[in-house]
Structures are given as structure tokens and as C-alpha cells.
Amino acid sequence: MWLNREIGKESISAEELSRRLEDYFKGKSISSWIKDHFLSRFYGDTPHRFMIAMQNPSRGMLAGYAYEHHFFLKQWVKSLAYVIAKSDLEEVQRNEIDNMLVEFFGYGGKPSHHELLIRMGEDLGLKKDEIINGSPLPRTQKSIGVWEMICRDNHWLEGMAAMHSLELVANRNLRQMGSRVHYFNEEILGSDRYPKSVVEFLREGYEADVGHSEYSLLLVDRHCTDVNLREEILASYLESEEAFYRYLDARYLRGKEFEAKL
């Protein structure tokens, strides 16, 4: 499926396939390559259906987001911990610790992104225990397994690229990068249509993910000096991209499930 989409559907020789794959991975810096591919996959001619739903989200869709994203954030912390354990570079460790605090623990008197997520879910009709002690959809569980494998088994630069590329999804500069839509309809941030907790949760990601994603990917650029490792990093990113696409499907499907209940 990936070859059909990215390389071509026609029958070609092994030598030609090798040449095309080499060309596919050539070119810009790692961060620029990832940005281009992420934008094309999730915000291209046909944006992911979760993004389309977020242009006018129902309470059920937002509740589905809250429910499935809890499991993503639990894996997020584990994934970044692998990067910290594998790298001796202080700027890398500090970057990952900062991300973990913002996303899962909070600091400086501010609630974590995870806490804001739980508050949103509660205001939309879910119970905290229902979220914390629930089970993710199989698509989310499968994607979590991919991120666990990449960060546990591969080079720490592959883990950084695989995880921090996903923060591009809420980058407030998406339109400047060529997207026709944002991650969500930005009018929500000034609307009273949704509970205050929804606005606070969405605003936190909107304001934080530019610096987090872009600085982290620049660190990957800075510390990757091996052309062979570069290809491994991009290959791991593609695995993560596929997992993220599947995970966003899980958010959408859970949202549809909750639309019928809430």
C-alpha cells in the first residue's frame, strides 16, 4: 500500500525500486522532509477525517478525542523516557523533560495537558475513572505498540523524530505551511459554544506545539551526522506517521460512538 501511494503502482525491477527509494529519501534536512510529508499526509488534498470533523466538532467527537488521547499521552511519556535514557546530551534530555512536564505533569502552577484533557472529558459527559481505567480501541493499541517499539529498540534520534513529528498536527503555522485547514476551527478559541475546558485544552496545544515540534526536530537535524542513520530516522518517521493516521481514525470512531451516547 505504501509503495503504491509513494513510489508508484506500475511493475518495476528491483534496481529501479532501489533507485526510486534512494531518491525518495534524498533532499532537504530531516526536519523539512518530515514537515513536507506530514503536511501532505494529514492536510493534503483530502485532510484526515478527524481534522475534517474538528472543523465543527460535536460534543461526542471531542469526548472521543479526550478518551483515546489519554492512552496516547501515557505512551508519550514512556517514549520520551527512552530518549532520555539513551542520549547523554543535556540539551536533548532537558527538551524531553520539558515536554513530559508540560504534557503529563504540569509545572509552574499550570495544569498539565493531560489534566486539561481529563477536565474536557468530564465536562463533555465522561467520568474520570471511565477515561483512566478504560481500554483504547484496537487501532490506538496497535499504534501505541509501534511507538513503544521504535523508542525502545531503535536509535534515540529515531524516537525523537517519530514522536515529536506528531506535534506538527497542532502547529499554529499550518496555514503558512500550505494547509487549507487548521487542526481545529480556530474560531472555537473565542466561542462560548463549548465548555471552557474544551477551549483551554485546545489553546494549550495550539500555543505549545510550535516550539515543541520545531525545536525537537531541529535537534534531530543537529545531531544526525550519518547518512545511513538519516534514512533510518526517516523510515521510523514513516512508521510513526502510519501509526498516527490509524490512531486519529480511532479518535474519530470513538467520537462517533460517543455521539450516539452523550
Image: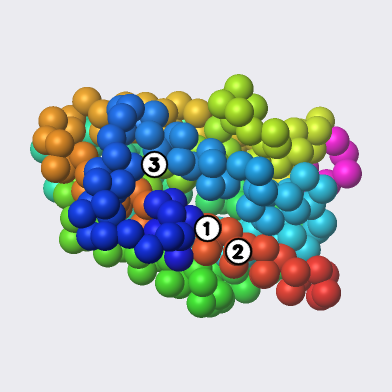
Name the amino acid, label 2: Asp
In the rendered structure, which amino acid carries the disc numbered 1? Tyr
Q: Name the residue under label 2.
A: 249
For label 1, the crowd category at 10 Å Cα-Cα, with few meaning under 14, some 14 to 19 and many 20 or more, is some
| Tags 2 and 1 touching, CB below 8 Å | yes
Pick the residue in front: 40 or 88. 40
Is 261 above or below relative to 66? below
| Distance between the alpha carbons at the discs numbered 3 and 2 | 19 Å
Give the magenta part as a residue range. 191-197
Q: Is mark 1 on a helix, strand or loop?
A: helix
**Residue depicted at x 33% and y 59%:** 12
Q: From the top left corner, tell me how far across and down residue 192 is, in percent.
A: 87, 39
The disc at residue 245 is: 1
Pointers 3 and 2 in contact (C-beta within 8 Å): no
- Which residue lies most toward the right here? 193
Q: Quote the CA–CA distance across marks 1 and 3.
A: 15 Å
Could you give the CA–CA distance between mark 2 and mark 1, rounded to whole angstroms?
Answer: 6 Å
Please tell me whether residue 130 is drawn above or below residue 161 in the rendered image.
below
Q: Mark 3 points at which residue?
A: 164
Mark found first going from the N terminus, 1 or 3 = 3
